[in-house]
Image (cartoon, grey):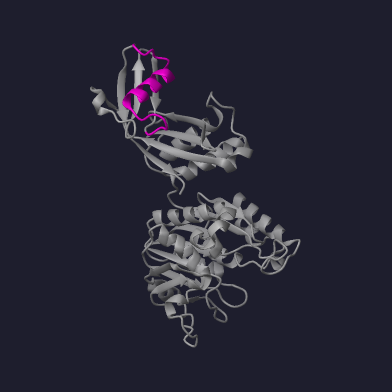
Amino acid sequence: MATVFAGLMCHAPIVIPELSGQDALQCVSTTRAMREVAARAVASRPDRVVLISPHSPRLQGGFGAWSGRHQGDLADFRCPQVSVDLPDAPEVAQALDLPPIPSPKARPPPPRQHWLDHGAMVPLHFLWQAGWRGPTAILALPWGPARQAEELGRALAALPGRTAVIASGDMSHRLKPGAPSGYHPDAAAFDHAFVAALRAGSWTEAVRAEHRDLAAEDVVDSTRVAMAAAGYPHNAEVLSYEGPWGVGYTEAVLYDESPPLYALARQAVAAAADGYRLPPPNGGPRSQGVFVSLHRHGELRGCMGHVAPQHGSLYAEVLDVANLASTQDPRFPPLDPSELGDLDIEVSVLEPPEPVHDLAELDPHTYGVIVRSGRKGALLLPDLAGLDTVQQQLAAVRRKAGIGPTEPIEVQRFTVRKEVAP
């Protein structure tokens, strides 16, 4: 029926903390983004995941597909505990008339389950960690130009049911002296052009990024398939780009049918820091009260919200509130673009408040509170640091509202559903 999610993930084993040890500190952004792409792919509720790996065995003249159960680990990288075991999605190869890639029977042990290439294994590891256990198709690129990439992607989009497509690929392998493919001073220009085009939603420019021939990349052809499967950028976002060891790693969402609220808030915050507002995407659930909280280095940097919804769509509500938290919180100056890299964003969706008749009905870790006294009133979200008792919570919300400690108050409680990036 449709592609419901499309994303780009790198395939460097070193971005897996279980393997990299202390080196994990040099690619924190990449690892976090890999987790987010995987989580969002799984959250899209696909009937199948299709992964395009540039390191799977290639056939002359066309794409191929792994067959049978997909089992593998990273024993070749001294990390056998990183493993997956997933069922095939045979309808993909059947519908697209893809030949099976050759099973390397001539290879000596280890057994077959260790032969899944790292181009597939690394993204699949993050999908596995995100809870994916469903049917999975692993496709191999052809030798030579992938002339049928767009045709293949469109065929994936036409499959019955819901399909999530993951492009596996690394950027330039020549960013620094000592890089895997040697150093070239123009290699970084490819990465910059590719990422800039993705950020702008200019997919044609991305696949035509300059200096591709110098970059020693393996990202463009797999991404072409995912782009064609998606059709057009929808809730698209570049989540991370890093190149700590001379190879560039980009993680991006190309298409997300139902984006998480934290992602919408993040895009709205970035837009607000640059001085503009995002138009709300189409669709989305019916609106509710929403608060967006910004923290930087563990300290509050902004928090604004609506107790009652002011828009028909929850997506529109989140974008509006995120903009307010970035620019209108009277306790802080407007957010500067230089702060975005250190920002943590939390979205709290409020359930309808209910009156409190007895303080025993409150719990500051479970319930937020709204207090009113005449024209004065204020709200506190639940589970705030330093507010561990009902008395502390009520004292804090009284101060926020400017209500004296002995003034009579009306109290309501509410629960929230929080969304934060993985």
Residue 319 horizontal side relative to residue 389, left or right: right
Q: Is residue 177 magenta?
A: no
Check the image and name the residue furthest to the front: 22
Which residue is located at x 51 percent, y 30 percent?
Answer: 324
Residue 199 horizontal side relative to residue 65, left or right: right
User: Toward which corner of the image does residue 251 lie, by quadrant?
Assistant: bottom right
As displayed, is residue 409 above or below residue 336? above
Please tell me which residue lies in front, 110 or 170. Answer: 110
As displayed, is residue 250 above or below residue 324? below
Which residue is located at x 52 percent, y 42 percent?
Answer: 266
As displayed, is residue 260 above or below residue 71? above
Give the mark count: 0
Residue 341 in view (yes/no): yes
Q: Is residue 385 magenta?
A: yes
Which residue is located at x 63 percent, y 58 percent?
Answer: 206
Range of the magenta residues? 383-406
Residue 365 x %, y %:
34, 34
Please tell me which residue lies in front, 45 or 20. Answer: 20
Check the image and name the residue furthest to the right: 185
Residue 293 x %, y %:
47, 34
Residue 67 x %, y %:
42, 77
Which residue is located at x 49 percent, y 84 percent?
Answer: 104
Residue 191 horizontal side relative to residue 32, left or right: right
Residue 152 in view (yes/no): no
